[in-house]
Image: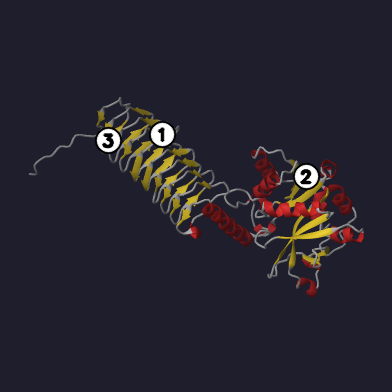
Amino acid sequence: MALSVLILAAGKGTRMNSNSPKVLHHVGNIPMIYYSINLAIKAKAKNIGIVISKDATEIKNFIKSLSINIKLFVQSNQLGTGHAILSAKEFETKSEDLIILYGDCPLITVDTIKKLINTKKKGADLSVLGFLSNNQKEYGRMVVDKNNNLSKIIEYKDADKNEKDIKFCNSGVIISKAKILFSLLNQISNNNSAEEFYLTDIVSLANKQGLIVKSVYCNEAEAQGVNNRQDLSEVELEFQKNKRLEILDNGVTLKDPSSVYFSYDTEIDQDSIVEPNVIFGPGVKIKKNVLIKSFSYLEGCQVDPNVVIGPFARIRPQTVLEHGVKVGNFVEIKQSTLAQNVKVNHLSYVGDGKIGKNSNIGAGTIFCNYDGNKKYNINISSNTFVGSNVSLVAPLEIGESVTIGAGSTITDDISDKELAIGRARQINKRKK
């Protein structure tokens, strides 16, 4: 079966009250449209297409950054979901089956899509994903029988009072043979209150033509779409809830799950412990038996087994903490590699550096890596001791088994096994 996925992302998103396209607002620290693209990949779609508006430069740039083979289609005028799909007419001949997804619905799972695909395999010509809801949001209402046969979908704008009382609502996600879908779309009109071409009108048409139309259930949270900032916050909360469960199921201890925030790609191995109020930005990989203490912020880093971080530590991108490293309170590390058993326990900044195994960086040590124009590297070899309140002025090469006296400002390289002291000599004078 040549499966294709078409993602609709041409909506104006005016209710977001934003200068950015709606689908580029972040959920889990990545634009929400990423999740629909990733879902298409997980569903093993042979072809992936996205319908965008004519002025969607930012969306184009994001898609390009993913380095995924995606075909972009332009909907010249926003005349409804049916019209948007017709903008991708090329998919009629390139696809056997076609799934319609939405760039602003980031929580749908691959298991749900598999259920949709299975109804198609069992003989449905068209299947629509729906959910039960007790709230009064403006969802389309789905009319089904006890065998999940779907007779019609009524847009909320066009529903009467009784129809609005229906609890089974339309997610908009469908699967159909591509030729059937485009044939039905060519028959719909915009004779409705919004003067738009509704995708939902194909359900009634399909039934009139004797086609088999089925419904598939998912939970309401999974089908949540984003229309405004409140929706965005609700989707983010649901994403975090799901990610926390994933992390817990992986054998990780979260002391207070609701206070820990993850990104879409956070990875933590078993028997690691995360204390309350920790934030994981994008690109964090944590190995086994790591302890991350409260109020720490990590992004773009690799943390090897048996590392202790925090409390109040900031680990920035391109940082590697090797086995047994200890990073203590009020320490910031950026674009640096700390080898095995390195200790940076207090009030320090390490940037653009390499620190060899078993070295100790004293409290208040600063890597002075920026001269106001360019950044430079500092390399410290193994078994070196840096005393408290030391300023290391880059570029520097510091040898093995070196000792640097407290309060020093180091501007020159230091060879192996040397003692370096770079401070004024203390002078004591008797008071008059």
As rendered, which of 212 and 165 lies closer to the eye?
212
Q: Label 1, label 2: how many angstroms apart (C-alpha)?
A: 49 Å
Front label number (1 vs 3): 1
Which residue was labeled with disc 3? Answer: 408
Q: Earlier in the sequence, mark 3 or mark 2?
A: 2
Residue 26 x/y as whole percent: 60, 51
**Image quarter (top left, top right, bottom left or bottom right) of the N terminus:** top right
| Image location (x, y in percent) of residue 31 | 63, 49
Mark 1 closeness class: few <14, some 14–19, many ≥20 residues within 10 Å: many
Q: Earlier in the sequence, mark 1 or mark 3?
A: 1
How crowded is the residue under tag 2: few (<14 C-alpha within 10 Å), some, or many (20+)? many
In the image, what residue occupies the spot 32% across and 43% down?
Answer: 364
The earlier-in-sequence mark between 1 and 2 is 2
- In the image, residue 378 lies at what x, y percent? 39, 31
Q: Amino acid at mark 1?
A: Gly
Residue 12: image quadrant is bottom right
Q: Residue flagged by tag 2: what amino acid is it?
A: Leu
Tell me, yes or no, if residue 79 can be seen here. no
371, 333: nearer the viewer: 333
In the picture, the disc for residue 3 is 2
